[in-house]
Image (cartoon, grey):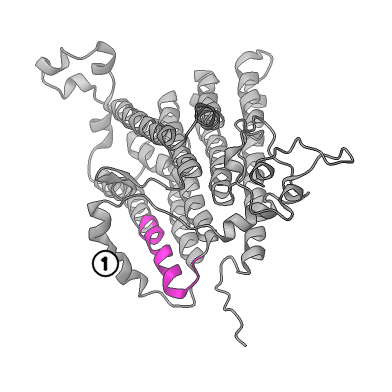
């Protein structure tokens, strides 16, 4: 039976017909596909589905395990509880999550109007609004789980909604920080965005193998980062941002200190120095996550398969740096949208497949069109700037469609399996 549970989809029955994951699961316990490695093609599913019968059964039995909480989490928990108790009992927890996500959407839209390429100063009130939206979004994000327990509506769908909104809201976080750093139209912006979204993917990747989602490292976690971003953004509305961030590092450090640092660093503007610092922090977090997963897995073969499953987000992170600098300068926003939607798609899939214990292929096929279009723009001298713009804009529409289509199917399958509604509380019938 254990061997049967680990069969790959390349197996065939007596008639020579390739079996699907659903077929393999018949009369067997729910299948754990996280132990199986696939390069490009995951186990076949029934047409129109994104989850197998076995995966849905695993989701129905899934129990969310969070990592350790920080002192700030503990201190703010009574406030979050008090705010949650003010919500009406008919309000679904996923509706709370959605309302929080809409705050990020509002901030992103307003900042787009005033700084389309993330490189222009924005009015002070935009930063006040963006800071408020960040704080409100995260506060509601902390309340949705409490509302779920309060109303008896806890379900694995809540994890998809909660963390699914988190990964798309990362695009808003990048836009908000760039509103005062003004680092758009450069590769520095994409270093900031790609490291943020890659690290978020890796947190879900770690849960896929260890079944524990990390929230913090020491006493610094997602609460400190989100509230810190909100407060800093509001503070930036009171200062001369151009005078602050456009000065070089050597202008703010004593000569005795700056003379000890490499010239490339001391000659950087502070807005880019902040990106270097952020990137160094992410590298440390990513390495710690990788080591935790390697320590959890028993064999080198399993560790190799886990490492390979980081290839898709790595490819997405490399893609913007394949593009010519002059193209990035004029089209930062649309490139960022394409990158953000693609990261969000594969991250949501990783979240769901972690709950479903389904095989996640190392090379996600949705990544390849963006990769090849970036190569096309880089190397085809006959491609006009207008043609390149239409190609990226088309990819934005395609990835938005793929993300919404995949997520809607997953939500419908989960709701049907658990006999729940998505944005309303379904009260069970009593005899």
Front residue of 351/402: it is 351
Please identify the quadrant where the C terminus is shown: bottom right
The residue at the far front in this view is: 1
Asked whether, in this view, residue 344 is left or right of residue 150, the answer is right
Find the residue positioned furthest to the right.
Answer: 15
Residue under the point 35% across and 74% down:
85
Q: Which residue is mark 1?
A: 78
Q: Which residues are magenta?
A: 137-154
Image quarter for residue 265?
top left
As helix, strand or loop, the secondary structure at mark 1 comes to helix
Looking at the magenta stretch, what is its main secondary structure?
Answer: helix
The spot of residue 218 in percent (x, y) is 26, 42
- In the drawing, does residue 426 fall left or right of residue 185? right
Q: How many marks?
A: 1
Is residue 27 found inside the magenta-colored segment of the image?
A: no
Eyeballing the image, is 59 above or below 168? below
Given residues 275 and 147, the one toward you in this image is 147
Residue 128 left/right relative to 4: left
Name the spot of residue 254 as percent of width and height, x first.
Answer: 11, 20
Query: Dot 1, how many residues are within 10 Å of its Cα: few (below 14), some (14-19), or many (20+)?
Result: few
The answer to whether residue 52 is left or right of residue 320 is: right
Percent position (x, y) of residue 357? 58, 47
Residue 256 percent location from the top left of the image: 9, 15
**Image height of 297 relative to 225, above or below:** above
Give me the residue at 55% from left, 73% from top: 425
Answer above or below: position of 385 versus 69: above
């Amino acid at each position: 039976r254990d061997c049967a549970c680990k069969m790959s989809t390349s197996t065939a029955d007596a008639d020579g017909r390739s079996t699907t994951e659903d077929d393999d699961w018949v009369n067997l316990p729910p299948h754990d596909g996280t132990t199986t490695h696939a390069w490009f093609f995951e186990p076949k599913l029934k047409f129109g589905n994104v989850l197998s019968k076995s995966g849905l059964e695993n989701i129905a039995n899934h129990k969310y395990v969070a990592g350790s909480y920080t002192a700030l989490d503990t201190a703010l928990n009574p406030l979050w509880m008090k705010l949650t108790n003010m919500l009406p009992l008919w309000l679904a927890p996923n509706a709370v999550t959605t309302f929080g996500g809409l705050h990020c959407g509002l901030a992103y839209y307003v900042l787009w109007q005033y700084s389309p390429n993330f490189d222009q100063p924005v009015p002070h009130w935009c930063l006040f609004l963006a800071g408020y939206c960040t704080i409100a979004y995260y506060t509601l994000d902390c309340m949705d789980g409490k509302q779920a327990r309060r109303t008896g509506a806890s379900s694995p769908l809540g994890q998809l909604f909660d963390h699914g909104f988190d990964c798309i809201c990362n695009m808003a976080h990048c836009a908000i920080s760039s509103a005062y750093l003004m680092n758009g139209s450069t590769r520095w912006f994409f270093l900031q965005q790609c490291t943020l979204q890659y690290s978020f993917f890796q947190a879900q990747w770690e849960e896929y193998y260890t079944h524990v989602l990390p929230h913090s490292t020491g006493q610094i976690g997602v609460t400190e980062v989100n509230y810190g971003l909100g407060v800093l953004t509001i503070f930036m509305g009171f200062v001369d941002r151009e005078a602050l961030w456009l000065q070089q590092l050597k202008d703010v450090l004593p000569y005795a200190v700056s003379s000890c640092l490499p010239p490339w660093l001391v000659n950087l503007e502070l807005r880019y120095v902040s990106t270097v610092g952020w990137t160094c922090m992410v590298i440390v977090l990513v390495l710690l996550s990788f080591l935790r997963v390697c320590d959890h897995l028993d064999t080198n073969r399993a560790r190799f398969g886990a490492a390979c499953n980081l290839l898709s987000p790595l490819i997405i992170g490399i893609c913007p740096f394949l593009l010519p600098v002059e193209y990035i300068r004029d089209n930062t926003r649309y490139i960022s949208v394409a990158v953000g939607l693609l990261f969000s798609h594969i991250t949501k899939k990783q979240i769901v497949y972690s709950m479903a214990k389904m095989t996640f292929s190392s090379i996600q096929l949705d990544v390849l069109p963006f990769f090849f279009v970036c190569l096309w723009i880089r190397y085809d001298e006959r491609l006009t700037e207008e043609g390149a713009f239409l190609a990226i804009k088309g990819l934005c529409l395609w990835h938005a469609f793929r993300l919404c289509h995949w997520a809607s199917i997953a939500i419908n399958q989960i709701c049907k399996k658990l006999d729940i509604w998505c944005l309303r509380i379904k009260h069970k019938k009593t005899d």
